[in-house]
Amino acid sequence: MDKARTEAGSTRPRVLVVGGGTAGWMTAAALGWAFAGRMADVTLVESEAIGTVGVGEATVPHIRYFNQRLGIDESEFVRETRATFKLGIEFRDWGRIGDSYIHPFGDFGHDIDGMPFHQHWLKLHRHGVAPPLEACSLPILAARADRFAPPASDPRSIRSTYSYAYQFDAGLYAAFLRRYAEARGVRRVEGKVVEVERGPAGVAAIRLDDGRRIEADLFVDCSGFRGLLIEGALAAGYEDWTDWLPCDAAWAVPCDAAPGPRAPYTRATARDAGWQWRIPLQHRVGNGYVFSTRFAEPDVARAALLANLEGDPRAEPKLLRFKAGRRRRQWADNVVAIGLSSGFLEPLESTSIHLIQLGITKLIELFPANGRADPVVRAEFDRAMSLEYERVRDFLVLHYCATERDDTPFWRYVRTMKLPDTLVDWLAAFRARGVVPSYREGMFLPASWLAVLFGQRVVPSAVHPLVEAADLKQTQASVDAVAAACARAAAAMQLHDDHLSALVTRAAA
Ligand code: FAD
């Protein structure tokens, strides 16, 4: 029997998290917060010799709810992880070379006479009298001016129309969560897993390189792309989506920041065979070129990345390889896959950490009291995760297929590739009448779809008849009023750098 159980004399289920990257420590911290010492004994095993992926610096707003739920103080978190604030992502050169648009974490205007704002804007656009769509989004105006303020909670305030996320050092976040988890009773074991022992319930135990054997009732596979347990031991299978998302490699390198303010947003610049990220942190800038090896040699991609840095590189570029897709079963027998072991969709919309978070939320929601999940629980976990993976996939694919670019073989491929049926249906509805996907589950709200669709020049051929019938001057006055309110509110925000300094100083005090 496992040492922890014998020592504690406990009959609580034993949970073993395998892997100590972002996924492992987020899982351990959340399980520590929810269960450790009361309803489960939680252990994490990791190998310093193997290390972590070490990228994953940009997030979506949901991470704030994760931190808040764990009671993490924002200023301490920002200081410890050298974080900056993020209001959205700027996409450069995606629709056409020279284009730039921002996908904001927030709304475009508000419903007018019960009809969506974009329908009214579209009507003005068709008459040639619309302000730029960007002007109707407070987070975009703030981002473009390097300004930031936390949103207001009063729904009547225009400052309640957006949200925000963080850009942070992933290694520091994992270390921060490790301290948090260990303080809440999570036990950490250093060692390399060299063998996974099967048992009647799935996996019975793992064995480390020094001979130690660790048993558990429930295993959480956070071992990264390897999927040591979920694939290595249980062969859960992998659904390959590279036909839709052909990027399968990335060079990543941090560099010095160019002089000037830190941008409160991530940038994704389209390149010949993929795209390049720029993520500003407090102490450096994270960069990477995500590319398809079908369309570019790694050496060529590396040179392209180094030629497009704003400051001196701080390390040798690191090459990462991956395959877009998801694990067919995400909870198989007594093994739950969370993080890269469960699948990977390229980092274009910073969704991986969100998928980790969703996996953890579902695991806590479905946590079996005795550690043994029945088929219904496993099926519900798989359903929720599959749905989210597919929704994220379609949203990412949209960025590639909605392009007018045909200047390289890569862009010609993605422009004309066969699309997932779900996306074909949504695109048809939008092109015909401006209908935007809206669903109860799934992370991307209509404003996100609109940002990418309009940003990449996909414009519906008709507006809703009710909006069409409305008085043009009145519509114009309403839309102009939104733009004016956004401009006033953005100008009243403090600079992002000032907000950061105040927060970091407060944490240090
Ligand atoms: P890893 O970081 O690989 O951790 C695996 C852990 O398992 C390590 O601790 C390792 O030591 C351990 N391990 C493995 N084998 C063994 C063994 N045999 N014995 C013991 N321990 C073992 N996500 C975002 O949300 N935003 C982004 O901006 C973003 N950018 C990315 C860019 C790129 C190029 C890539 C590839 C990914 C990016 N991601 C991003 C995804 C993000 O990096 C991951 O979701 C996140 O780091 C979680 O990784 P992980 O913990 O699942 O795996």
Image (cartoon, grey):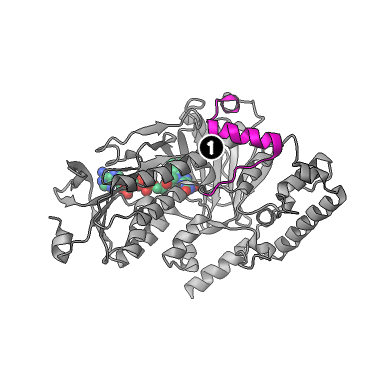
Residue 100 found in image quarter: top right
In the image shown, does 64 or 261 lie closer to the viewer?
64
Relative to residue 241, is residue 188 drawn left or right? left
Whether the magenta-drawn stretch holds residue 199 is answered as no
Decide which of 339, 385 is in the foreground and name it: 385
**Foreground pick, 238 / 78:** 238
Q: Which quarter of the rendered picture does the N terminus lie within? A: bottom left
Q: Which residue is drawn at 54% across and 58% down?
A: 84
What secondary structure predominates along the stretch shown in magenta?
helix
Where is residue 127 drawn, in percent x and y?
84, 41
Label 1, on which residue? 394
| Residue 373 locus on image (x, y percent) | 28, 49
Q: What residue type is labelled 1?
A: Asp
199, above or below 301, in the image:
below
Which residue lies at the image location 29% right of the left edge and 37% below the top edge? 231
**Residue 232 pos. (x, y %):** 26, 37
Residue at the (17%, 43%) spot, across then down: 199
Q: Is residue 431 magenta?
A: yes
Q: What stretch is highlighted in magenta?
A: 413-440
Position of residue 166 in the picture relative to residue 225 (left or right):
right
